[in-house]
Image (cartoon, rainbow, N blue to C red):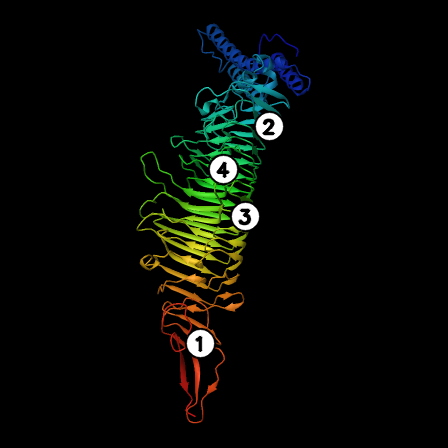
């Protein structure tokens, strides 16, 4: 660039020279072959000279004011009234105009660089023994808001701190290799540390960790590609990170972290990291959309490896997780151990090793108070291809788990809407255990759980839906509905619907479902609402089993039944079909059935009644009668006429 000596920046000649310098600078800035060191100096020089020109203009103006005042000290002539050449009527007016113009040109120069960004390449001479971290840090520290990366492959050996002046990082197709070994057990060893930097936008690029991946214990690693705290409106799009010993991206993980409001993670590929692809804690209104979160964890450690995780020690609020591929992780696809209000929608969770989706809370604040759960919607997700045998490092797999381990705050309610999800390719063998849907209701004081319009296609399982057995709350109250679902499996090892003792399910409706089981090993029933002590439990509860279509191959033993009743008056069965045949109803006091005979296999309760579906007239003239049905006078499975059953005869009067 041509350099000019500018004697008087107020003159037309001075301004023309400055304009020429700026124009030539930006033309060279655009040229692809620009020398990095020279470009950096030119960027700094442009802003410096613009600032110097403004300062010179102000000084010249002051000097001219003093000269005019000296020449007119015995009169009343001042710069503001002294005559000037050109279009300005006074010297003061002309000086003010020149001053404003120079300030405008200086700001215009800076704005041009703000729009174009500072290229990291300009600082490449600061490389230190193969470490490009100082190069990037120098670009970050220029004070400009946009940092541009060339499409290079470089190695970083020390963390880069993103200052609060940076508003956008354009990685483009840059590949950054991070070699730093973890020295202290601190997240600050991460490759990019963002703390107190608001409104930061990150796009493109790939980061790969070359240090020690496995430090032994599940959560020993602390190095992530991005570690973000105390930063609002953080947005990252199209970024890839892999092989970090903590997470691809980690946001506000601790209960003491300042909240990060409105973080957005979209179109990122966070894979093969030691702990998780994406993890977050003290966040509000986080959106994770359309990311690939796969193969995180390590095969030898079943205690970690998450596609996406909400940290247990923190409290994410109002989270939306949608359209992600959280597949083939070594523990869980999507995991929440803590949180208030959330939406998990249209995600793929394929081939995860132990859990597909896990939303169960056991979180307390720093004072030991249990956190509130709020409302959760888990909808339209696909959980697929989970299998287990007894040779694995763990014994149980779960498709979808919801609930709370901790006793929820008094007077607070929680709700889970689980709808439109598909669980298929789910299978266990030998002595392994598997539950497509598992509800931990023991911590609920007051909760609503709706399992509606879901589909389960499985091989061998224990139960389709199980409500966990635990000591839980003596005063808990869960209102649960299992409706309009389709369940099918080859083998059910236990009751297909198992509501265990102390699960605190006070209201349960299993209605309008289709259930298909090729083989069942359970010795009791298809639906077990409690256990052998059921007659002493759930005294204030209610259970309905209505309008279900059941295609279940009956086992060899004779005591198997569809629903375990225990003579309860708060249970009703109505309009269910077992293998195409209308099943007996229960009205809260007795079984009611329409059939051609009393000899129906089952465990009957005294007072039950079988209505005769084919009545006819019996007897001779004068003593004719019809049999409207058969009344049960004993409890049990025996079916002997005039001992267990008696005909209900109605005289015809003819």
Q: How far apart are marks 4 and 3 (CA)?
A: 18 Å
Q: Is residue 61 visible?
A: yes
Q: Name the residue under label 4.
A: 393
Badge 1, how many Cα within 10 Å: few under 14, some, many 20+? many
Q: Which of marks 4 and 3 is nearer the N terminus?
A: 4
Which comes sooner in the sequence, label 3 or label 1? 3
Can you identify the residue that label 2 sits on? 205
- The Cα atoms of the two marked residues, 2 and 3, are separated by 36 Å
Q: In this view, does 548 lie above or below 409?
A: below
Q: Closer to the N terminus: mark 1 or mark 2? A: 2
Q: Which of 632 and 119 is in front in this view?
A: 632
Instruction: State the separation of the CA atoms marked 3 and 1.
Output: 42 Å
Mark 1, residue position: 611
Pick the quarter of the image with the C terminus: bottom left
Q: Which of the two marks, 1 or 2, is nearer to us in this view?
A: 1
Q: Mark 3 points at which residue?
A: 426
Cα separation, mark 1 vs mark 2, equals 74 Å
Residues at marks 3 and 1 touching, judged by CB atoms closer than 8 Å: no
* Image position, residue 328 (x, y; %): 56, 38
* Callout 2–callout 4 Cβ contact below 8 Å: no
- In front of the other: label 2 or label 4? 4
Is 333 located above or below residue 516 in the figure? above
Residue 332 picture location, percent across and down: 50, 39
Percent coordinates x, y for residue 507 in the rendering: 38, 57
Nearest to N terminus: mark 1 or mark 4 = 4
């Amino acid at each position: 660039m041509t350099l000019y000596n500018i004697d008087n920046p107020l003159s037309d000649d001075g301004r023309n020279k400055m304009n020429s310098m700026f124009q030539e600078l930006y033309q060279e800035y655009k040229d692809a072959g620009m020398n990095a060191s020279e470009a950096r100096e030119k960027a700094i020089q442009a802003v410096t000279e613009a600032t110097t020109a403004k300062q010179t203009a102000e000084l010249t103006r002051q000097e001219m004011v003093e000269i005019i005042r000296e020449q007119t000290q015995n009169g009343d002539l001042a710069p503001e009234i002294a005559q000037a050449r050109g279009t300005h009527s006074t010297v003061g007016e002309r000086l003010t105009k020149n001053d404003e113009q120079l300030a405008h040109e200086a700001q215009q120069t800076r704005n041009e660089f703000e729009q174009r960004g500072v290229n990291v390449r300009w600082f490449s001479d600061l490389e230190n023994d193969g470490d490009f971290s100082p190069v990037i840090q120098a670009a970050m520290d220029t004070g400009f808001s946009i940092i541009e990366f060339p499409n290079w492959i470089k190695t970083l050996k020390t963390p880069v701190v993103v200052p609060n002046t940076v508003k956008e990082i354009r990685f483009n197709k840059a590949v950054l290799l991070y070699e730093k070994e973890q020295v202290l057990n601190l997240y600050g060893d991460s490759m990019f540390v963002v703390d107190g930097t608001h409104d930061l936008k990150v796009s493109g690029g790939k980061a790969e960790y070359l240090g020690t991946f496995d430090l032994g214990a599940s959560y020993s690693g602390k190095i992530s590609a991005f570690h973000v705290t105390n930063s609002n409106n953080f947005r990252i799009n199209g970024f890839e990170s892999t092989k970090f010993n903590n997470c691809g991206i980690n946001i506000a993980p601790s209960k003491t972290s300042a909240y990060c409001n409105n973080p957005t993670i979209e179109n990122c590929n966070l894979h093969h990291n030691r702990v998780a692809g994406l993890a977050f804690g003290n966040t509000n209104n986080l959106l994770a959309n359309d990311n690939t979160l796969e193969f995180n964890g390590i095969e030898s450690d079943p205690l970690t490896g998450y596609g996406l995780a909400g940290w247990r020690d923190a409290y994410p609020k109002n989270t939306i997780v949608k359209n992600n591929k959280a597949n083939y992780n070594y523990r869980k696809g999507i995991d929440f151990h803590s949180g208030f209000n959330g939406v998990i929608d249209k995600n793929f969770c394929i081939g995860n090793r132990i859990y597909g989706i896990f939303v169960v809370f056991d979180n307390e604040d720093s004072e030991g108070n249990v956190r509130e759960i709020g409302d959760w919607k888990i909808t339209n997700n696909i959980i697929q291809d989970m299998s287990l045998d007894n040779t694995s490092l763990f014994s149980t797999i779960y498709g979808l788990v919801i609930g709370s381990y901790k006793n929820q705050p008094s007077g607070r309610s929680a709700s889970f809407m689980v709808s439109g999800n598909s669980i298929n390719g789910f299978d266990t063998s030998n002595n392994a255990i598997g539950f497509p849907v598992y509800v931990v209701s023991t911590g609920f004081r007051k909760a609503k759980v709706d399992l509606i319009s879901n589909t389960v296609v499985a091989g061998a399982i224990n139960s389709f839906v199980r409500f966990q057995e635990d000591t839980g709350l003596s005063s808990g109250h869960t209102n649960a509905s299992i409706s309009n679902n389709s369940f099918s499996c080859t083998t059910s090892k236990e009751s297909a619907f198992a509501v265990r003792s102390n699960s605190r399910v006070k209201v349960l409706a299993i209605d309008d479902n289709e259930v298909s089981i090729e083989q069942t090993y359970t010795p009791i029933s298809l639906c077990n609402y409690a256990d052998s002590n059921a007659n002493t439990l759930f005294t204030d509860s209610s259970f309905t089993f209505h309008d279900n279509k059941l295609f279940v191959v009956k086992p060899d033993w004779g005591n198997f039944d569809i629903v375990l009743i225990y003579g309860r008056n708060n249970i009703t069965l109505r309009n269910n079909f077992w293998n195409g045949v209308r099943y007996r109803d229960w009205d809260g006091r007795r079984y009611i059935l329409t059939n051609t005979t009393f000899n129906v296999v089952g465990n009957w309760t005294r007072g039950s009644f079988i209505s005769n579906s084919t009545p006819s007239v019996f007897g001779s003239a004068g003593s004719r009668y019809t049999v409207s049905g058969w009344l049960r006078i004993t409890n049990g499975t025996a079916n002997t006429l005039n001992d267990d059953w008696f005909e209900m005869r109605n005289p015809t009067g003819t």
